[in-house]
Amino acid sequence: MMPPTDDTRKECHREDPMKKHNWIFGAATILLSLPSATTSFTLPSSSVALRRHHVSATSTSTSPIRLSAESSDDGDSKKIVVIGNGMVGQRFMENLLELTKDAASDQKCTLATFCEEPRAAYNRVKLTSYFETRDASDLTMTGPYESDGRTAWYDDNGVELYLNDKAVAIDTEAKTITGESGREIPYDVAVLATGSYPFVPPIPGRHRPGVFVYRTIEDLEAMLAYVKENNVQSAAVIGGGLLGLEAAKAVADMDVTSHIIEFAPILMCRQIDQGGHDALVGKIEEIGLQVHCGARTESFVGSDGTTTDDAEESNAPISALRFSNEDWDDLPVQMVVVSCGIKPRDEVAKEAGIDLGERGGVVVDSQMRTSADDVYAIGEIALYDNFIYGLIAPGYTMADVCAKTVAEKSLGLDLGLAEQPAFTGADLSTKLKLLGCDVASFGENQPKPDDADVSEMVWDDVPGGIYRKLIFNKDRTKLRGGILVGDAGDYTQLHRLFQTEGELPENPAALLAPPTARTGPVEEEAVSDDPSAQICSCNDVTRGTIAAAVQELGVEGATLPVLKKCTKAGLGCGGCEPQVKQILTQELEKLGGSLSSHMCEHFPYSRPELMALIRTDPDIDSVNTFDKILAKYGKGDGCETCKPAVGGILASLVNDDATVIGGGRNALQDTNDRSLANMQRGGSYSVVPRVPGGELSPDQLIAMGEVAKKYDLYTKITGAQRVDLFGAAKYQLPDIWEELGEAGLESGHAYGKALRTVKSCVGSTWCRYGVQDAVSFAVRVENRYKGVRSPHKMKSAVSGCVRECAEAQGKDFGMIATENGYNLYVGGNGGVNPVHALLLAADIDEDTVLKYVDRYLMYYILTADKLERTAPWQAKLPSGKNGGGPIEHLKEVIIEDSLGICDELDKRMQHLVDTYHDEWAEVVKNPELRKQFKQFVNTDENQERSDMIEFVDMRGQHRPADWPADGQPQTNWQAPDDDIFSRSEKSWVKVGSVEDFAPNVGSPILVGDTQLAVFNNDKRGEWYCTQNMCPHKQAFVLSQGILGDADGIEKVACPLHKKQFALKDGAQIDGDLKLLTFPVKIEGGAVLVELPAEKELDAILGTHGLRVQKSDCIDITGDAIKVPPRGAKVEIPGDFVDGQKELEKLMTDEALSGGISNSTDPVEIK
């Protein structure tokens, strides 16, 4: 897409003339005080960027509002310029600022950095995690990104950041650096931190569309777009090293079949050996990726069949890989990701005449100095002792050495160091989680063949996918290195023994077995008590540093997120987080505190503990409602964490109501359960009928199609063999389900923490390979467990033979048919961290399968933590008596009844099966339940989904327009800190009767074009009214949020992203957004809200004015007028003052002035 021209910008801004009026009226409290002849003024201290997505230029001037600041006198401070704003360059600046924070004025420096990318430094090590949220701010190293890619850190620390500007030249004589923009910056000290770029082998066809490298967020976004636009089904990743496997995961996360192409005979040949390779490949192929080692890629074949390297001759998209291996066929792929190594980005240094290595890289000494005076190099560009270090930990060490050297040598600081800082090489040991599999290596993991002082031990568990090799000296008195694949739970202990040459056990073989295979319960790996012990190798954080931080933060302040932020431990690759948490626990205990496992501030118990209290309470009637449980075991009002958890416990134990929203339990339900449907982007809902076993009749298919057409619902087959109908308004749901129910379709519980589906292949009924009737058994299983609430969602599958077409081993519980019955697997799941299910029982009949599944699920329901899937729950269980790990424990409990609880488990599951109701069938026939789905309690009028968010056409169906990224227009809507309606005449408006508003929940009302949310806190006898639009994404959903309190402050949690707002003043508890609030009073059973005139209210909060639109009609160029923060001095172009005249005209408009009521009598809105 081409950037918009000036003409298209004007076209976008012309789209709705009322936007300008709405915004000007919204900013009335600012602009009315603006003297017409004044071109600068000072605002109070907080932001008033009200309705900024509607801001339009009121003149043809393109001059921006300029924030003026006092210029600082740098005096003789040294100018230090960092070329490259990656992780290492950023760390250098942070280190130097820390060293100079208390320096005298003549020892200060000013920092500047060139950044080629469109956003400031981010954690490239965690690049694949970008897919979890698609929010770059989750990777940032310096705080949330602003709309221009910057963060506040740079201004706060006086660092000049040149975004989108690559340094192209350095003049070491004149001491200047030139950017691609033409910017020329003088320097006293220059630090080269340009990193590396992906090495792309000279394979013919590498220029083709569909060939990418894996390095930046932009690379990922480009791949995602290409996959979407070209319907990519299969892709190849060239390279089987660390980067290649990360890239393969990225491709797999795009739901594309991923082929790993490696030239060497094994994967990760620098870190592991053949045995480690075999274990790793087994794990990788279990999750659907395919590995091709020893591959000699000859060319990238185009869709026109050509293999040319000439882009002018053929630029057809990639369609296959061709190999020179004998008898290897072409591999059909529609995308290629090249990730087979890196090359230092040393071209700027080369042009400047700075010494390079024979194969690239800037030659440095142990202080990171280059051959040019006052020029340093750090990170992947630095060649030390003829070696390029491609890991982040050595890069951070270089940054530390360089910062100290610059501080002492260039700034004249006395750091009091006993010896000169020096980089003398780095330990290349590493522990990673690659494609869900532990991979670690340390020390001399592959000794030379002629090394006589070697003794090796190998653990090779092929079925379990675990390989471990430990290398000792000949006498087995020292650990020299090791390779750990599949289970690296004791990596820290083994690595420490290697580093310190620590004393080994009398029988060193005791170190070989993986932790999960050792007898007794799996114990958490001990952390060294030595204060100097390194815990975080990425950021060089010791135990002493972490312990001191806990002491300083204290019992109340020391939480894991706070500790990670202030020490930087765990902010690199994340591998040390368990050790950081362990140290936090230990240090809190020393202070008399503990690391809380409490559910929230309202219950001093974890979910399993609270479940046990309720389950064993002798008086079940005293714990059969949330209020009773809260009074007996908790405090306060509850919140969005504990209410759904307790609601789930009640549904799992008591289940005495036909729906989870009856009997006042709607106040406990989270986003989806409260509406018995999944809330989607923009506040609409999806409808998913149950399809047991994936079996549907033609009449049911027709019924779904007719409903979809009638209500204009986007229709898609889910990944679990069901039909999903998207885009329903909440008020339409009962009517939709009434029609679906007439066709015999039930609720699919896609909205609940419950059984979602039991997937199946056709089994022996149709398939020539099937040995059991998989469909019939899947239908039986699904109908037994449908509606059962659990700590998290559950999925199952039945495969009719060992070909495993239903993928049963990737489910929470799954059955694979054999000639003698079924093999039962438990504890698997897909998703971000896929886990392979483990075999619980083999060759058992259907009734026995159900008996064991009953017990397994109920054991899980009774003992798992909130929102914990079966896989992590199962992994935390103790090991069996024979050392067989958690699966052995489950066999003892479920099959052998070792705990004596099977009778209870059987009865509790049978109770849930016997008390099942189709929740939507109950709603359809119950008028009181149907009332909960009315759009507004005070009127029968409805606002359509397209009134709130624009719907766009996609292949003949309609979907909501994409949400803009956070910080972009149409997000983070901000209300002024003071009352925007303070100058308005207001009246008390009757919006309904008390009985119209359900207790302890929010209810939406409509006043004019404005949606408001009225909250009836029956528990406290208090009422509140706010805007119904959550300002985060401008979605009209706040009335559907859960009420609660935080430290005594009554709040509501937005159902979309759990943003929390105080109900009294509208302030965001966990951020800086704000709601507009309105007084409420009760008179004679009527609910009254004090409001300004409708037209004033609609000018600020009207639904149509706040409607989210696709981005080509908003201020994508960033040149619309922005209201600056209060307290800032502002210079305004002269012709902008014309806007004030337009505002004054608007304020005196007859329609507006006539709409202001002086009456204090209630006005009923119909």
Image (spheres, rainbow, N blue to C red):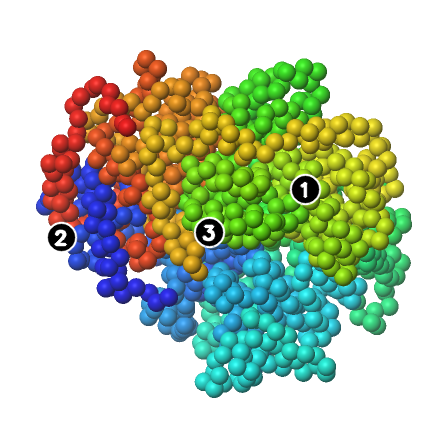
Marks 2 and 3, the one that precedes in the sequence: 3
* Residue 714 - label: 3
Q: Is residue 594 left or right of residue 900?
A: left
Q: Which image quarter is the N terminus in?
A: bottom left
Q: Which image quarter is the C terminus in?
A: top left
- Give the labeled residue for mark 1: 782
Q: Secondary structure at mark 2?
A: helix
- Give the labeled residue for mark 2: 1135
Tell me where residue 544 appears, x and y as whole percent. 63, 42
Amino acid type at mark 1: Glu
Tell me where residue 603 appears, x and y as whole percent. 59, 25
Q: Is residue 184 above or below residue 132?
A: below
Q: CA distance from mark 2 to mark 3?
A: 47 Å
Q: Nearer the viewer, residue 1128 or 365?
A: 1128
Residue at image point 64% right, 40% down: 755
Q: Nearer the viewer, residue 1041 or 1049?
A: 1041
Mark 2 and mark 3 in contact? Answer it, CB < 8 Å: no
